[in-house]
Amino acid sequence: MSETPPGWADELRASRAEKDEFLDTHRQSPIPPEKRDEFDGLAYFEPDPEYRVEAEVTVHDEPEQLELDTSDGRSVRYDRVVTFDFELNGNDVELHGYQQPDEDLAEAPIFVPFRDKTTGPVTYDGGRYMDLATERALETGDVIPLDFNLAYSPFCAYSETFSCPLPPEENWLEVAIEAGEKDWQ
C-alpha cells in the first residue's frame, strides 16, 4: 500500500462529484441525452487506501507495438512503454502501460487499461482504465503510486457510438480490484 496523502478520500469524492455533474449536464457527455433524466450519478467502490499500491517501474527502451482490439471491432496501435510490478492482497501483480506511437513518455499520460475479477459482474464488461501522468519521465527502478481508486469506465460503457480500446490479455488480472467506478447501469 502506498502512503495516503492527507485529504485523499475527500479529494477523490470531490472529483467523482465533478465527473457525475459532467456526465449529467455537459453537452459532450457520453450518456445519451434520452438517458440523462434517469442518471443520478455513477456507482463507485468506497475509497480504499489498500488499492493505492506502490509499483516498481520497468521502462521499455524499445517499446513493443501492439494492436489493441476496440469495442467496435476495429483495432488501434499502442506501444507498451512500461511495466508495473506490485503486490495486491498478497498477490504479485504485473500490469503494463501504453502510449500511442510517437508520444513522449515524459509528456503524455500512460494509458493503463485492465480487466480484473470484478469485470462483468460489478464493473463494465469491457474493462476499465487508468491514466497515469507523471511529473518527469519514468526510469527503470522508480517506485510510484498506482491508485486503482481512480479506475474508470471508458465512454463506450455509456454509449455504443464510442469506440474504445479493450484491455489486452496481458492486462487481465487474476485479482479483484474493488476500487474505482462500478458499472453504471
Image (cartoon, rainbow, N blue to C red):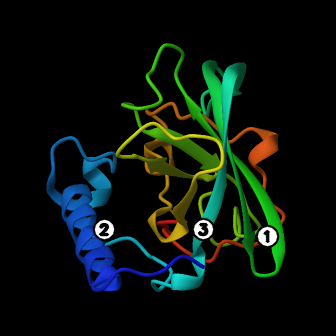
In this rendering, the answer to whether 51 lies above or below 77 is below
Measured in 3D between alpha carbons, the distance from the residue under mark 2 to the one under mark 3, in whole angstroms, is: 35 Å
Label 2 Cα crowd, 10 Å radius (few <14 / some 14-19 / many 20+): some
Tell me the kind of residue under disc 2. Phe
Cβ atoms under marks 2 and 1 closer than 8 Å: no
Residue 116 at x, y percent in the picture:
73, 62
Q: Which of 47 and 42 is in front in this view?
A: 47
- Looking at the image, which residue is at 63% across and 61% down? 55
Label 3 Cα crowd, 10 Å radius (few <14 / some 14-19 / many 20+): many
Q: Nearer the viewer, residue 167 or 83?
A: 83
> In front: mark 1 or mark 3?
3
Q: Which of 121 and 9 is in front in this view?
A: 9
Residue beneath disc 1: 175
Tell me the kind of residue under disc 1. Val
Residue 89 at x, y percent in the picture:
76, 81
Q: Which of 140 and 23 is in front in this view?
A: 140
Q: Which of marks 2 and 3 is nearer the N terminus?
A: 2
Instruction: Give the secondary structure at mark 3.
Output: strand
Query: Splitting the image into 4 quarters, where does residue 16 fall?
Result: bottom left
Residue beneath disc 2: 39
For this view, does 111 lie left or right of residue 140?
left
In this rendering, the answer to whether 40 lies above or below 174 is below
Q: Which of marks 1 and 3 is nearer the N terminus?
A: 3
Instruction: Give the secondary structure at mark 2.
Output: loop
Tell me the kind of residue under disc 3. Glu
In this rendering, the answer to whether 91 lies above or below 25 is below
> Which label was assigned to residue 54?
3
Residue 183 at x, y percent in the picture:
54, 66
Does the rendering let one see residue 126? Answer: no
Measured in 3D between alpha carbons, the distance from the residue under mark 2 to the one under mark 1, in whole angstroms, is: 30 Å
Does the rendering let one see residue 66? Answer: yes
